[in-house]
Image: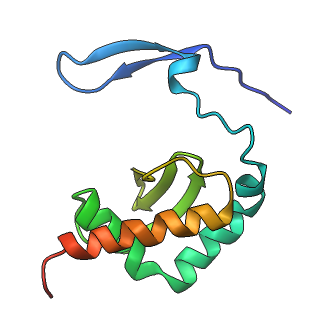
């Protein structure tokens, strides 16, 4: 088994936007979010099976991504990851969450916001 313990990263965020970040700046604290971590696989499965339309709206209306079959790929206390064809986007929750019920409430709030921003089809 291999275990990586990063000390930091070198972020290249575009021309002239290069910065070194330490571990505390890139780490997401998960203490207290054990219920969320235990339920994450189920949340991902549920979102992809029952709420693909919402995931698509998150990507297009809230994150400005191109339309497509966006997939819900994971969640942590600060937000969730959406993916399409090897591209990943991160959607922040309105507030940190620690359990699946809080994730549900955050996603309901975000889909409402996304619907209000989405153009009529």
Q: Measuring 69% from the left and 39% from the top, which residue is drawn there?
A: 30
Q: Measuring 58% from the left and 57% from the top, which residue is drawn there?
A: 74
Q: Measuring 64% from the left and 67% from the top, which residue is drawn there?
A: 101
Q: Is residue 78 left or right of residue 11?
A: right
- Coloring scheme used: rainbow
Residue 68 drawn at (x, y percent): 30, 73
Residue sitting nearer the eye, 66 or 32: 32
Q: Quadrant of the C terminus?
A: bottom left
Residue 69 drawn at (x, y percent): 37, 75
* Quarter of image, res 39: bottom right
Residue 84 drawn at (x, y percent): 39, 63
Residue 86 drawn at (x, y percent): 42, 55
Q: In the figure, 87 relative to 54: above or below?
A: above
Q: Furthest-left residue in view?
A: 120
Q: Is residue 70 in view?
A: no
Residue sitting nearer the eye, 34 or 13: 34
């Amino acid at each position: 088994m291999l275990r990586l313990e990063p000390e930091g990263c070198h972020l290249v965020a575009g021309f002239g936007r290069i910065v070194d970040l330490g571990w505390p700046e890139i780490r997401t604290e998960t203490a207290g979010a054990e219920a969320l971590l235990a339920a994450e696989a189920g949340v991902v499965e549920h979102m992809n099976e029952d709420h693909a339309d919402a995931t698509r709206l998150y990507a297009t209306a809230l994150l400005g991504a191109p339309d497509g079959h966006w997939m819900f790929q994971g969640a942590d206390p600060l937000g969730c990851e959406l993916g399409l064809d090897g591209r990943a986007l991160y959607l922040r929750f309105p507030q940190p969450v620690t359990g699946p019920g809080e994730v549900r409430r955050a996603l309901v709030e975000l889909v409402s916001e996304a619907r209000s921003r989405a153009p009529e089809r």
